[in-house]
Image: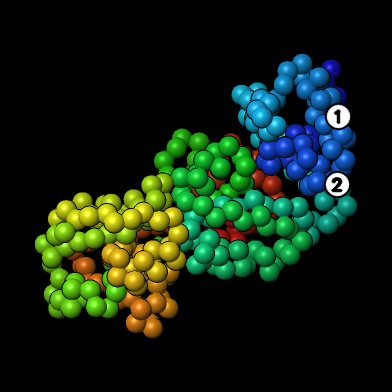
């Protein structure tokens, strides 16, 4: 009969999330030998490893990936049991691992987290900002509890809940030839030099959809940060599709101008991403309630 302890489960989960015994030990305030022994004892009871050992790092194998969400659920349910048993149902604790794509993480983080943080200040928020593909992958492998992304994500194990409407603008420096035209038409963009986000970004997907409606142009560079693209456009290196929320200040100060392109559909939806099979404990449910 298995007798896996909560400490062993905790060590397993932290190693899975952080990739090493040392990092797990630090997170759990254990010595490294104690964390190593906890993992070894759990694997002994399972009669199988849950990690592959690769050059000093531990990576979940197929068995580990199967067991990780169950271990996380057991730990969350144990915490919930303690909260209810002591009558502290109004005070949430623990942590939430939240992923946000770049537009959300850099320009809408207050909208995303503000209400929840003000109401539940004992819950630690671990925010990871990356592109949409990376956030979706992290929600899938349970290294994030929930994500908020800019682009469409289709996967049978992921649920996408609409959160906010968003809009891109085609931005240029004030002295750009296109900025001086009174009535832009799609043909005016022939040969335009574009600065793009990197593949995997939802902004890149929306931009490519727009470019498909325009005459061929030239991609002069790909950058993985919106602020870097703003600087490149302001310096006259090209034009770019940028989130409206990210360029408000630059438009107000005249560093950039927004080209009028009613012939392009630059609308998109921001979505909350959830794993359909993930246990949704009290903290996650409270977060989801705060963003509806």
Image disc number at residue 29: 2
Give whichever of 235, 11 is nearer the camera.
Answer: 235
Q: Is residue 272 left or right of residue 5?
A: left
Give whichever of 4, 286 is nearer the camera.
Answer: 4
Identify the residue shown where x is 19% and y is 72%.
178
Quarter holding the C terminus?
A: bottom right
- Decide if residue 276 is in sight here: no
Identify the residue shown where x is 53% and y is 61%.
105
Q: Is residue 202 left or right of residue 174?
A: right
Identify the residue shown where x is 61% and y is 39%.
142
For the residues labelled 1 and 2, say whether their Cβ atoms are less than 8 Å apart.
no
Query: Does 274 sit above or below residue 70?
Result: below
Q: Secondary structure at mark 2?
A: loop
Disc 1 crowd, CA 10 A, few/some/many (<14, 14-19, 20+): few
Report how far apart the C-alphas of labels 1 and 2 lie in the structure: 14 Å
Q: Residue 150: image x %, image y %?
A: 43, 55
Q: Earlier in the sequence, mark 1 or mark 2?
A: 2
Identify the residue shown where x is 72% and y is 57%.
124
Q: Residue 224: image x %, image y %?
A: 44, 55
Q: Which residue is mark 1?
A: 37
Q: Secondary structure at mark 1?
A: helix
Query: Does 263 sit above or below residue 13?
Result: below
Q: Residue 68: image x %, image y %?
A: 67, 33
Query: Does 73 sit above or below residue 292?
Result: above
């Amino acid at each position: 009969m298995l007798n896996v302890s909560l400490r062993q489960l905790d060590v397993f989960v932290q190693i899975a999330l952080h990739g090493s015994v040392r990092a797990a030990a630090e997170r759990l305030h254990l010595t490294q030998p104690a964390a190593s022994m906890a993992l070894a004892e759990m694997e002994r009871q399972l009669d199988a490893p849950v990690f592959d050992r690769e050059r000093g790092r531990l990576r979940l194998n197929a068995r580990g990936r199967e067991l990780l969400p169950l271990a996380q659920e057991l730990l969350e349910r144990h915490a919930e049991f303690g909260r209810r048993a002591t009558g502290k149902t109004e005070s949430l604790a623990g942590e939430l691992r939240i992923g946000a794509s770049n537009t959300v993480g850099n320009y809408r983080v207050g909208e995303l987290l503000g209400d929840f943080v003000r109401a539940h200040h004992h819950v630690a928020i671990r925010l990871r900002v990356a592109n949409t593909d990376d956030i979706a992958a992290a929600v899938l492998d349970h290294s994030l509890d929930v994500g908020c992304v800019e682009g469409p994500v289709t996967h049978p194990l992921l649920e996408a809940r609409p959160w906010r409407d968003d809009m891109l603008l085609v931005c240029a420096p004030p002295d750009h030839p296109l900025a001086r035209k009174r009535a832009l038409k799609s043909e005016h963009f022939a040969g335009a030099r574009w600065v793009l986000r990197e593949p995997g970004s939802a902004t890149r997907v929306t931009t490519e959809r727009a470019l498909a409606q325009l005459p061929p142009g030239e991609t002069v560079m790909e950058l993985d940060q919106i602020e870097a693209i703003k600087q490149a456009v302001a310096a006259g290196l090209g034009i770019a599709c940028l989130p409206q929320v990210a360029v408000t200040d630059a438009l107000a100060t005249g560093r950039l101008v927004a080209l009028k392109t009613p012939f392009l559909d630059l609308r998109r939806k921001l979505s909350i991403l959830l794993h359909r099979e993930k246990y949704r404990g009290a903290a996650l449910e409270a977060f989801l309630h705060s963003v509806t």
